[in-house]
Amino acid sequence: MSTIEVQSTRGIAAAPSAAGEPAPPTWLTRFDERLEKIGEWLNPILVKECRQALKSKQFVITFALVLLCAWLWSIAGIAILGPGVYYSFDGPEMFFGYYMILAFPLLVIVPYTAFRSLAGEREDRTFELLSITTLRPRQIVSGKLASAVVQMLVYLSAVSPCLTFTYMLRGIDVVSIVFILAYLFAGSLAFSLVALLLATVSRERHWQTVISLGVVVALCFAFFLSCIACYEVLRFSAFAIEERWFWLAHGAAATAYLSYFALFFCAAAAQLTFASDNRSTPLRICMLAQHALLAGWIALMVWEEQGEIQYMTIGVPMVIGISLATFHWSIMGMFLVGESPQLSPRIQRTLPKTSAGRALLSWFFPGPARGYVFVLANMAAAVGMALLGMLAWEAVYPPAPGLLRPVRFDQVVMLGVLCLGYVAFYLGLGKLVLAWLRNYSVVGALTSVLVHVILLLAGCGIPLVIHLMSDFRLSGYHLLHVGNPFWTIEEVVDAGGGRGGSIDAVSAVWIVAAVGLAMLVCNLWSILAEVRLVRAASPTRVAEEEAALAALHAPATQLPRSPWDEVE
Amino acid sequence: MVASHSMIELHRLHRFFGRTKAVNDVSFEVEAGKVFGYIGPNGAGKTTSMRILATLELPSFGDAFIDGFSVLDDPDRVRRRLGFMPDYFGIYPNVNVREYLDFFARAYGLRGTERTKALNYVMDFTELDKLALKPIGGLSKGMKQRLCLGRTMIHDPAVLILDEPAAGLDPRARIQLREMIRRLAADGKTILISSHILTELAEMCDVVGIIEQGRMLAVGSVHDIQRGRSGVQTRTWVRVRVLGGGGGLANWLAERTDVHELQHDGELVSFAHHGQEQAHADLLREMVLAGFPIAAFGSQTKSLEEVFMQVTEGLVQ
């Protein structure tokens, strides 16, 4: 609603009646004013996008098509069912048809519109005008997302009468309808966020075209997969809400969804953030939260299943935890060590003041060396937690005599050392290569990922080529493959790390630990250089303004309210 | 706003694109309430330095300040004080004039009556009130330019940076825009404006700067630039009438190194003279001492366009 309309409405409300008395405000006027007040605090992007969408042909055509398809499917479905509509269990079939009608706009059109909305702003350079306003990057991303949510709700409102109709038919319950729609809604929101993130990746028109094509293909594929999933779920009616594991699994999935949503949201906002601003700290906090959630969920699952596990082994969940943590921090580390080592004066003004603060909190600030240490510290914490958890568990539930456990404590120790060593080595080497590359060119996040993938491929591929060209037997693990983390870890965990397994695997653990430590030492100088930075003083002009603002917001000195106050 | 510091300050600003030096060691200051004209051929580095001031580009070296705040370190504070009108429109489809301005008012954090007042003021100032409900796509170039000016000043910034605001406008729209800029200057706004229409800049600006190939060639008031007091060697056209014929004077002047383009026609001798007013006075004194019967001596100030053509070589990056 434009301000002009509101003004005119207010004008009518305040206009004197024929008798000369002001007309009493109608409920409609009051409701309109209330809406206007709410609208004041809505995200400006959301307001603008809704105004645009309501006038755009694309939205009108899509909405009309969704309505038309829903009506056509209703008529066709009833015609096919015939008299069976009164007694047969055909709700799932009808629901599946409506699902496809709703899923296409939600999983393809809405995310793609979000992508085009941001990509278009960058192409038409309206984003530049937007970026110099006082809107913050996260407001821009959340405005675009909120606009996507409004579109989803509009499409859902078009199909909701039909979905209610399927419940009237037999064969489908409310729980299934609610859960399937919730998955669809969550999927659409997640795809919209990823599409927004992809729209920020490049400003070049040719890359935008390539990404745009990739987004369309991926969204169509996701739509296809979601239809298959919906069909299977409806067929097997798999929502066992009375099961404890159902809620545990959904809780874990929901927290994983939310944590990755927050991570991608922060990443999209970081991509739009001014270069001298701190883009990294929110991302690092998200990564740490994900790490904590992973540890928490593994601990909860173990606790829930303690009756089962005490007869088996605690080692398996610990191996899963360490492996997931290694995967998580390797991926995140590739991005973190690709950051610029230069810390802008703006960020330096927010560095911790004390030495203790620097020792604890410096790692949350941008910089490749800080990122490297941040990853290693978290990996060490993951391994430490796993080992301590295992020791504590075995103290409470000592292994029964004669029980052969599939994963022993020493295997978990070796796995932890190996994972830590590989992460320290590959990220440390990648960091050194990137520092060298910075002498010749600008290094971005994608370059960093590419360098690390090449290093990993070289670490796995070169020994393999040498192996294939030599007289060694192809089948067995050899110390030559120490650069291959996948094979070495598999050898240690599966083959038993020297007890019945390859003796080379045990040597590999020592080698990887030594090389990882050596790489950490090689990076020590840059780590110290980044940690030594201390908080910079604010420029005089900034201090002046902050003092003026503080004075403006300072509580007024209490004036005496009576002569007795003055005496006191 | 009265500030103890300059409202706009560029300090040894550099911006490199590969090997191209788009802005090469540019420094100048603009005092509060002044209008600074930024002159230079296409590709001289005007737009790049303006974009750095608008926090859209990062300098390769040096810094720029708006109201004392660094564009590098305090972009959010700069943005609150700055209105930037780029050399493109930046319009949204399916939006009318009022909705467009309303969106930017919201984006600058204006709420409630404050926003309504700002909208009404800007629409009145830019004379867009009759077009409030007109879709932006249907606006003429002049109307769009007024709309962009409205967007630039919606949050009442103290500093306005206008990149070629009059480019492509017809004479009437240009005059309207000029009047608006004059009114903004009268309201105490500090304005940095670039334009190719130098006669208009000469009328509007208190200070001008001439830039070419990323380097600032001259900075000063229009008067100083025209009279060669801005650090660049300019030539002034001098005319002398000598009683009884100017042949002797022409021969005498021909031997001087500070005189060029000598012309002689009867009693009239005209030539281009290097230097400022004191140099002309010294020359006149020498002529009189040399015994020439000087009946009239006049120097003609060059127009900004002539100075621009003289100072610049039309080179681009």
Image (tube, rainbow, N blue to C red):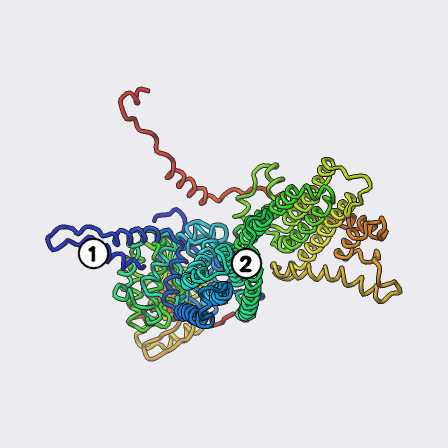
Q: For the C terminus of chain A, which image quadrant?
A: top left
Q: Tell whether label 2 touches label 1 (CB within 8 Å).
A: no
Give amino acid for label 2: Ser
On the image, numbered disc 1 is attached to which residue? A12
Is residue B45 at least partly visible in the picture?
no
Residue at 54% across, 60% down: A194
Please state, as top left, top right, bottom left or bottom right, where the N terminus of chain A lies in the image.
Answer: bottom left
Q: Is residue A60 above or below residue A553?
A: below
Measuring 68% from the left and 41% from the top, which residue is drawn there?
A307
Kind of residue indicated by mark 1: Ile
CA gap between label 1 and label 2 equals 57 Å
Report the residue at 56% width, 38% height from top. Answer: A353
* Vertical placement of residue A552 versus B200, above or below: above
Picture coordinates of residue B310 (x, y %)?
Answer: 43, 70
Residue under label 2, please give it.
B60
Marks 1, 2: nearer the viewer: 1
Sort mark 2 into few (<14), some (14-19) or many (20+) by Cα contacts within 10 Å: some
Q: What residue appears at the point 51 percent right and 58 percent down from the top-left corner?
A: A180
Quarter of the view holding residue B240: bottom left
* Front one among A204 and A11: A11
Chain for disc number 2: B
